[in-house]
Image: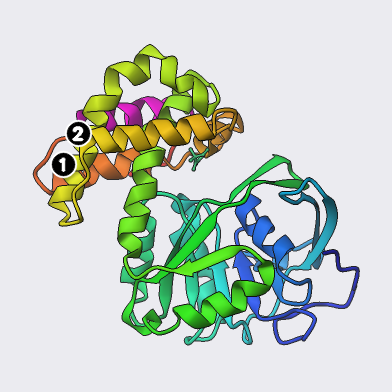
Amino acid sequence: MSSQRSARPSASDPEGGGIAILGAGALGRLWAARLPPTASGFVPRNPSALSSFRLHYHFRDSEGREHAVTRPWLTTLSDVTLLLVTTKAGDTLEALEQVIGRIPESCPVVLFQNGLGSQQAVAARWPARPILAASTTEAANRPAPDRVVHAARGHTWIGALTEPATDLVAGIIRQLSPSGLDVRGEVRILERLWGKLAINAGINPFTALLDCPNGEILESRLFLDSIDALCEELANLIAAEGLPPHSPRILRNDIERVARNTASNTSSMRGDVQSGRTTEIDYINGYVANRSRELGLTAPVNQMLTDRVKELVPHPSN
Ligand code: KPL
């Protein structure tokens, strides 16, 4: 999976390939490592600040094998045929503002953000572009700046958000197939994103507040005292959005099942707090609280968790 070439890369260079990745965190590096070396590269947000034309890191695949990965920073984006956006939810709109003018109008943009809110903001900002959302259960983490671990294999669902993307899903799946990752089309991508948001809303803030791995939240007073009300708030909002109803009981079962199955994991939110990074709480429990208010509902438990997580690390005010 490694590439040792040293020529200056560009997406129009056959060595640069056609898939550009915006966001060089764990998920972006997982995709780059899994795609053939000649097929992908990373998009710098500020090309003039690049100190090297290549990004090097170590990748441990899901079978525990180690790989040295080298991928180009793409300095030319005019021939990019697919853009995967793997930035944090809160950075996405601004990051895309910086690069979207350099990629072709017809290039599909696939958004991999957690939670909800950032995807709708991007689709509303560029309705004439082919914008899609992905929901993934691939588990990747970055225990050190130059190390990425593919902790567990999962599935990725992709669906269109804007009209120009409607017929592009099959072609994108074909383009991503050399990765060997399981990628499927999803007509109801918003429902899929809601399902993942509900799981994250019921796990991530508790792990961040209690500073514990996912499984340990299940015995905690905080979780046991608030999970039923939290699931009720989620179920009310899902129904008010006109999505297929979920009972609070089933939502709680789903949350507890995922927490047990990922018992030793450090959630992405706990990882953000430990590293002093802004969390995605505004796009998970914060999204539930705000959207509930907009639809005339209340979500005090989601609001309380949002407020408390925001006290752990500084967040931009919004
Ligand atoms: O998606 C996750 C996350 O950490 O964001 C869970 C499902 C909680 C697994 O850790």
Q: Is residue 138 visible?
A: yes
- The residue sitting at 62% across, 86% down in the picture is 78
Q: Is residue 178 above or below residue 60?
A: below
Q: Amino acid at mark 2?
A: Glu
Residue 303 part of the magenta-drawn span: yes
Q: Is mark 1 within 8 Å of ligand 1?
A: no
The residue under label 2 is 232
- The location of residue 76, given as percent across then percent down, is 68, 81
How far is disc 1 from disc 2 in space, using C-alphas? 6 Å
- The location of residue 215, given as percent across then percent down, is 51, 25
Q: Amino acid at mark 1?
A: Asn
The residue under label 1 is 236
Instruction: Please state, as top left, top right, bottom left or bottom right, where the C terminus lies in the image.
Output: top left
- The residue sitting at 26% across, 42% down in the picture is 288
Is the Cβ of the residue at disc 1 closer than 8 Å to that at disc 2? yes
Instruction: Please state, as top left, top right, bottom left or bottom right, where the N terminus lies in the image.
Output: bottom right
What is the span of residues highlighted in magenta in the rendered image? Answer: 300-314
- The location of residue 179, given as percent across then percent down, is 67, 68
- The residue sitting at 60% across, 59% down in the picture is 23
How busy is the neighbourhood of tag 1: few (under 14 within 10 Å), some, or many (20 plus)?
Answer: some
